[in-house]
Amino acid sequence: MRHAHRIAPLVVVKAEYSVAVRDVEHNGVFATARELGLSLIASSSLRGGLLTAGAAAIERMTADHRHQPRTQDALDDLERDLATLAAQWLRLDNAAESMIRRAAPARNDPAERRTTRRATGADEAARPYGHRARGTPARDSRGRPGANTDSPPGDRPRDSSKLMTAGSGKAEAMNLGPEASADAAYDVIVIGAGPIGQNVAARARAGGLSVAVVEKELVGGECSYWACVPSKAMLRPVVAVAEARRIDGAREAVTGSVDAAGVFRRRDRYVSDWDDSGQAQALADMGAHLVRGHGRVDGPRRVSVATPEETIVLLTALHAVVVCTGSLAAVPDMPGIAEARVWTNRTATDTSKVPARLAIIGGGAVGVEMATAWQGLGSAVTLIARESRLLPKFEEFAGDLVGASLKESGVDVRHNTTVTSMRRPSPSGPVTLFLDDHSEVEADEVLVAVGRIPLSGDIGLETVGLTPGSWLDVDDTCRVRGVEGGWLYAAGDVNHRALLTHQGKYQARIVGNAIAAQAAGQAPDTSLWGRHAATADIHALPQVVFTDPEVATVGLSADEAGRDGRDIRVVDVDLPTTVMGARLYADHYVGQARLVLDSATDRVLGMTFVGSGVTELLHSATIAVAGQVPVSRLWHAVPSFPTISEVWLRLLEALQAGEQM
């Protein structure tokens, strides 16, 4: 017990303790319960002070208030939880020395905690999960701080340098000493406080469960600061100007180019200058506790957190641990790539300098979006794609129309081309890319957008028999397969079902609801389209590519449906020639729509739209696919005239005409 003085000032309080205190507050027990809490905090001896104070307080409460029937359950709960509390502190007695040994050799290099917003290139690819580029992010669309959940955000600043203690939802903060450790129990522990982790926490809290959320970087995650939000904030001004130039009477008003400095100011506003205090406060407002640090699974239902203060916090999950660590841009291993200091999506969305020449490697969604943005901001962009067309996972016409538009805007698009090596002799000089067709491309910066890898390499998977660095294989409730006891879940990119923020948030809602149901003794509904099954990941996955023209798709493509062995009908419509709303939207509108229909059920399997403004059509298609709406009912959904949504009617007419042939 020679280390007891180092950990004695810590309080370990289960969430139900606070609930019980609130329940009996009006019956005169609050003062006694508070006295007990103060005794626990002030205890200078784990065995003596804690148990003596706890036993005395319980004795006083039970003796004085057993005669009050309406508080009996609360008192019983409080007794049980305080007994659990005492057991936890006794475990600290035996674990104190080993915990302090683990904290002493800091697992975080001090250099990792420098006040810097990002690491780029090969350094970024090598960074373990949670390396906190310690700045601070995001606000809502009106500039207010808030969480990336489906609940109203909070808007009060938060001192994020402090750790959250277990206990009530009031988010009290506690500074831990340099060698201190804390042990706390929660119903649910979430590793990763991005949009997915926040939504897990929100649903678990709505189910009455206590939640701890562990995060070492910025609360809000990749989407809020280096992906969805900043990229769209950068793209919208570029696309708006391009659209204005396609409308007679408006093009005359466009007398200059896009103001890059203004675009960067707009982006910075939408990422709150990388300040996460608003989102951290939103977690506190929902009653979840934020623990800053690098979280690792530490055996069954346990998570250890290496905090910025070089302490180890040990957390225990009564019901579930949910991994929401996301993914990281993949950087290929090729000669010269380290010295080239390539960009990834992070650099491409948080830099405020426009390179004169930008080479982009990758013809997928990130590649074409960033080509659109940076060409519009003034870079001369070269887009290098291995495939014969852009957006190879989409309907073929989507890649063709986007590619044609990029070329028209001045982007040099190279198909069927692979970069074999790079060279950058001077850190401030240009990069030369050597291609497999023996040609060369010289650029001032290089953006690599060739895919993602899971952020699971340093989160303790080996302690539960899983492979570090792997995608986590999950069932339709997002429960990780191969883990005894079924307590481990994974939502979002890290499970590789759908690398899209909105789909990860959908999974998070499924996970939070499933855990809450099981905690309440209910069997989860895992049937197709059941409340606790992420069926939409397979059958109704929506996705948007924010290029010019936009691409919006949901469900199965014609190729995917055909590979599934389905008997399908495919209907295509050219938007400008058939839809008046499209022609009014832009004088030289370019776009196409495709409907994939299951012939056996007469239901929509998939939809793809390409064109300006089509992103707002997508949810109607998503409802049709997820709702399994038959074509006979779609005839009764009347589109307003003259809008682009009339494409629905034109698709049905084309389908009917094909049937009559």
Image (cartoon, grey):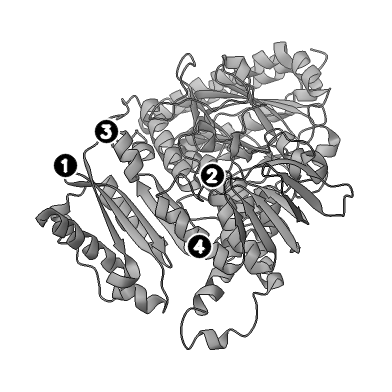
Q: Position of residue 574 (x, y in %)?
A: 32, 65
Q: Quadrant of the N terminus?
A: top right
Q: Under tag 1, what secondary structure?
A: loop
Q: Residue furthest right?
A: 426
Residue at numbered disc 1: 601
Disc nearer the start of the sequence (3/1):
3
Looking at the rendered structure, the secondary structure element under dot 4 is helix
- Name the front one of labels 1 and 2: 2
Residue designated by label 3: 565
Q: Residues within 10 Å of mark 3 (few under 14, many from 20)?
A: few
Eye-nearest disc, 3 or 2: 2
- Amino acid type at image mark 1: Thr
Tell me, for residue 404, which label it has, or none.
4
Residue 461 appears anywhere in the view: yes
Q: Which residue is mark 2?
A: 387
- Give above or below for 566 relative to 227: above
Q: Position of residue 117 (x, y in %)?
A: 75, 50
Residue 109 horizontal/vertical position (percent): 83, 32
The local secondary structure at tag 2 comes to loop
